[in-house]
Image (cartoon, rainbow, N blue to C red):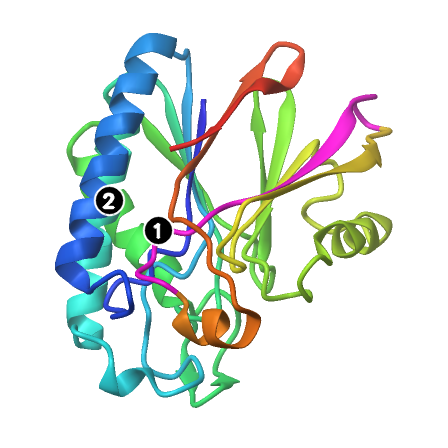
Amino acid sequence: TVVVWADPQIGKVGSRGGTAELLERSASKRDKLKRLLSDRRPAMTVLLDAGDGIEGFESGGNPMFTNDLSLAGQLDLYGTELMEWIKAVYEFSNLTKVACVSSNHAAWRNGKQNLGNPQDDLGLFMHRQVEKLVSTAGMSVSWTYPNDYDESVALDVYGTVVGMVHGNQFSPGGAINWWEKQTFGSQAVTKADVLVTGHYHSFGAGVAGRNPHSGRQRWWLGAPTLDNGSDWFRQTAGRDSDPGVLVFDITEDGFDLGFLTIL
């Protein structure tokens, strides 16, 4: 069972509230997830962090007057929440994998200008800290990080390759076209059967041709958000998406559409 934790943007204040409301929402989603995993009892659990774990202060707009946590506070809570989600999926499986990618809100920035390379990402930094804690605790959890200078990642889940990228690399609706170009260029997600993205704060799905490496139909899955609301988008586009957590299963036959759900 694969769980996608996407765009909580910890520290952000919006129409759905602030940190207190985010924590309440996050705990509620974890409770639903535990009930689902208790029923499914998967042989393996996978937690995908699709990015934007923190709101940051240099991501565009004027968030410095709306955030309710400092940067240090955001990172501290991000690590705490990440550990809670790992414990939630680990509880129901003897084997857990975690994968993460860089993202725009967690990037090391000066204004809108990125500094360093994609691995100088505050989200990846927090994963490395939590990984040390998990290792010390003796938990059977493994991590997959993007290669140096890469922003996408892929991992094998019982023979099905799951790829992930945050989503700020392409325009709305452009995930599959981006994936096609990455495949032609032999990039990290070339052999993926499933591509998971975040960034756009709403669920989306599409068929992306057939994988010559596995013979299976490729699927793109866009994950919903956990954040406190993108009010700037609602003001310009007139719509908003409910918060949620994307969950799906992979069997010996590959991606199982029948078990895809949003908590």
Which residue is identified by label 2? 26
| Quarter where residue 205 is shown | top right
Looking at marks 2 and 1 on the same chain, the residue that comes earlier in the sequence is marked by 2
Which residue is identified by label 1? 226
Residue 262 visible in rendering: yes
* 72 lies above or below 43: below
Residue neighbourhood size for the residue with mark 1, other residues' Cα within 10 Å, grouped as few (<14), some (14–19), many (≥20): many
The stretch of residues the image draws in magenta is 213-229
* 38 lies above or below 208: above
Residue neighbourhood size for the residue with mark 2, other residues' Cα within 10 Å, grouped as few (<14), some (14–19), many (≥20): many
Residue depicted at x 64% and y 30%: 161
Image-based side of 4 in relation to 210, left or right: left
Residue depicted at x 48% and y 56%: 201
Q: Are marks 2 and 1 in contact (CB under 8 Å)?
A: yes
- Magenta stretch: dominant secondary structure: loop
- Residue 121 in the image: x percent, y percent? 41, 67
Placement of the C terminus among the 4 image quadrants: top left
- Residue 177 in the image: x percent, y percent? 80, 54
